[in-house]
Image (tube, rainbow, N blue to C red):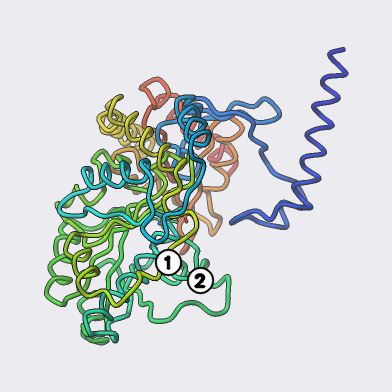
Amino acid sequence: METAIFKNEQQKHEELKRLDKKHFLHPTSSLKQQQEEGPAFIFTEGEGIYLKDIQGRKLMDSLSSLWNVNIGHGRKELGEVAMQQMGTLAFSSAFSAWSHEPVIRLAAKIAEMTPGNLNTTFFTSGGSEANDTAFKTVRHYWKLKGQPEKKKIVSRKKSYHGLAMGATSATGLQPFRDFTTSLAQDFHYVESTVESLRQLIEEQGADTIAAFISEPIQGSGGVNVAPVGYFQEVRRICDENDILFIADEVITGFGRTGKTFGMDHYDVVPDIMCIAKGVSSGYAPLGGMVISEDIHQELIDLSDGIFMHGYTYSGHPMCCAVAMKNIEIIERENLIENVRVMGDQMLQGFNWLEKEHDLVCNVRGLGLLGAIGLQSKTEEQLAPKVVNEALKRGLICRAVLYDGQDTLAFAPPFIINKQEMDEMITILHESLIAVEKDL
Ligand code: PMP
């Protein structure tokens, strides 16, 4: 009997692998590897900071999946809210200023949490749409103000802003832009220095630049923390030149860095904030663009008709209800405080690894967003090897290899405890030893 069940499971696994290869075009994946090996994991369950796959393997999820499952896996409460909302009002349009309670409550809650007078939210299904919305909105804004030539968007090298057409165009990581042949126009990139931004403004002319966009801490580009004073100075330059400042808080928003928003560390209030991921902890697809009262008022006062931008799922009732409950959980369980405490422990652990291993260099982080740099004596990149060794020991972690980097990135769920953090550091230590032995 047991053998029969086992055989069934095995058959099911093989069947799923075959169907995956034939029918599922994976996002950001090696298609050749998928065809040769099939999906490396077929996940079946999540609980806390762990995921389980079809083969019964239990893995620690040290990146909160895609930096998003912040409150951890397996929260039944969110499932209940989703079911309740779907059973009551699964969907209704928000076009033509129609509305419903979940979206109104969530927009008001976000206004309460965001700094300064960032008080009005446009909802999307994720971060890319949020950034594309911001790019279209700032251009629309300057057009309404009689300056249609103010349309250039400036972003930083190594930035990641998503992969919709506008978002890809703003992304400062070349491999993402090289994927296709033609992108959106009027996007420019600067180094992460104040001088580089000043120089670009001088070259291009402030009257041609609509906005500057930046992540408070670059995530996919390798967890790069900006130089001290950088954002304050950028804010000043933007003000001096009538350039709008967009903060891409898709990873950093809702507590990831130990404060509610990443920009809170710098006491900088952007004109527009883009959010996604942590707003719903991945339990439902949701993102948004939060605009200041000033911009909102101008959009109303100067309006030349309809705000001609919107998605079918702008303000999806179930997604909004789930996000609201997610935020309630973050507040109720005081999770941002835990991010600070565990973030310190993570960084201490990384510092210890740097002392123990010659391979480790340049450890960094803020809250539960961190990275370990690796240095190889050869051309060979080490991060993929460490990732492999960690997987063998039950830890999922992410290699960042763009721009010749050799980095491991971490963003564990906010609920991680001391013992689990110790386990994560121990596995990394053992994995590094294994890689060193092999060199
Ligand atoms: N901005 C940042 C900073 C991100 O990290 C991401 C996703 N990793 C995005 C935008 C794009 O979000 P999405 O994948 O939800 O479109």
Residue 367 relative to residue 279: left or right: left
Name above or below for residue 37 compared with residue 243: above
Tell me residue 372's x, y (percent): 40, 45
Residue 308 relative to residue 29: left or right: left
Tell me residue 27's x, y (percent): 60, 55
Name the residue carrying label 1. Answer: 171
Is the residue at mark 1 in contact range of ligand 1, meaning its CB lies under 8 Å from it? no
Dot 1 amino acid type: Thr
Name the residue carrying label 2. Answer: 177
Residue 154 relative to residue 95: left or right: left
Quadrant of the rendered image holding ligand 1 = bottom left
Name above or below for residue 369 compared with residue 329: below
In depth, the one of 55 and 83 nearer the eye is 83
Residue at figure coordinates x 58%, y 74% from the top left: 180
In depth, the one of 179 and 119 nearer the eye is 119
Residue at figure coordinates x 58%, y 70% from the top left: 179
Tell me residue 292's x, y (percent): 20, 59
Q: Earlier in the sequence, mark 1 or mark 2?
A: 1
Q: Count residues near mark 1 (Cα–Cα under 10 Å), then give few for <14, some for 14-19, many for 20+.
A: many
Q: Count residues near mark 2 (Cα–Cα under 10 Å), then give few for <14, some for 14-19, many for 20+.
A: some
Find numbered disc 1 in the image and state the secondary structure of the residue it sits on.
loop
Label 1 – label 2 distance at C-alpha: 7 Å
Residue at figure coordinates x 54%, y 41% from the top left: 386
Dot 2 amino acid type: Arg
Quarter of the rendering occupied by the C terminus: top right
Find numbered disc 2 in the image and state the secondary structure of the residue it sits on.
helix
Residue at figure coordinates x 21%, y 43% from the top left: 112
The answer to the question of whether label 1 and label 2 lie on touching residues, with beta carbons closer than 8 A, is yes
